[in-house]
Image (cartoon, rainbow, N blue to C red):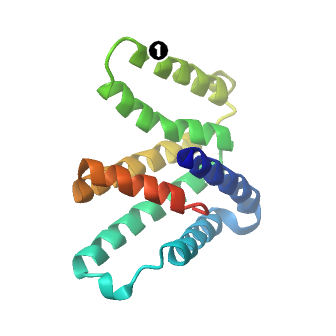
Amino acid sequence: MMAMGAMLCVQVGLAIAVTLIDRIGVEGAAWLRLAWAGVLMLVIVRPRIAAFTWATFRVCVVLGVVTATVTLLFMAALGRIPLGTASALEFLGPLGVAVAHGKGTHRVVWPGLAAVGVVLLTQPWGGAVDPVGVLYALGAEDAAQIGRGFVQSVFGDSGAAVFLRFIGGQLVGG
């Protein structure tokens, strides 16, 4: 339920951001999302400054850079392609991981249906989707995969899962 709530909040936040891109630009929308996420993290988590070491500070900086990269690339994609298409493209990374690590024939069926959905959303035969926007969305996914790998290397498998669920629930605005 928490994951569904987090996904809903992220998509609603993105829908609002799309309306702002024309007024404040891609960079402004990305900055606004990141600023709101930072404020919400400070209010909800209330980290103690004394608990930070140089090691935890470095981890936070790396995660911040990855998050900023993902957000900026995704906002750039939204400036060129529809939200549904960008979200579907960004979902291909985790879907690919699930296919690679899954067992049985059903692991190919669902990704196949997802691929058909992405093709129907992008309609490459109509030439309506900006290829640069597609590359931005895929770049955002690549950066997100790097971030997931980094979190897993820092926190381990079980710690990464707990951390990512926590962050997914906390980053309501980002």
For numbered disc 1, what is the local secondary structure?
helix
Is 4 drawn above or below residue 10 in the view shown? above
Mark 1: amino acid:
Val
Q: Residue at x 41, y 54 (%)?
A: 164
Task: Name, please, the residue furthest toward the bottom.
Answer: 50
Q: Quadrant of the N terminus?
A: top right
Q: Please state which of residues 29 and 80 is positioned toward the viewer in this rendering.
A: 29
Q: Which residue is mark 1?
A: 109
In this rendering, position of residue 90 left or right of residue 58: right
Q: Position of residue 44 (x, y in %)?
A: 54, 72
Q: Position of residue 82 (x, y in %)?
A: 69, 42
Q: Residue at x 42, y 37 (%)?
A: 94
Q: Residue at x 29, y 54 (%)?
A: 159
Task: Name, please, the residue furthest toward the front.
Answer: 1
Is 125 drawn above or below residue 139 in the view shown? above
Q: Please state which of residues 52 and 145 is positioned toward the viewer in this rendering.
A: 52
Q: Residue at x 45, y 45 (%)?
A: 141
In this rendering, position of residue 12 left or right of residue 1: right
Q: Quadrant of the C terminus?
A: bottom right
Task: Name, please, the residue furthest toward the top.
Answer: 105
The number of numbered discs placed on residues in the rendered structure image is 1
Counting other residues with Cα less than 10 Å from the Cα at mark 1, is it few (<14), some (14-19), or many (20 or more)? few
Q: Position of residue 144 (x, y in %)?
A: 41, 50
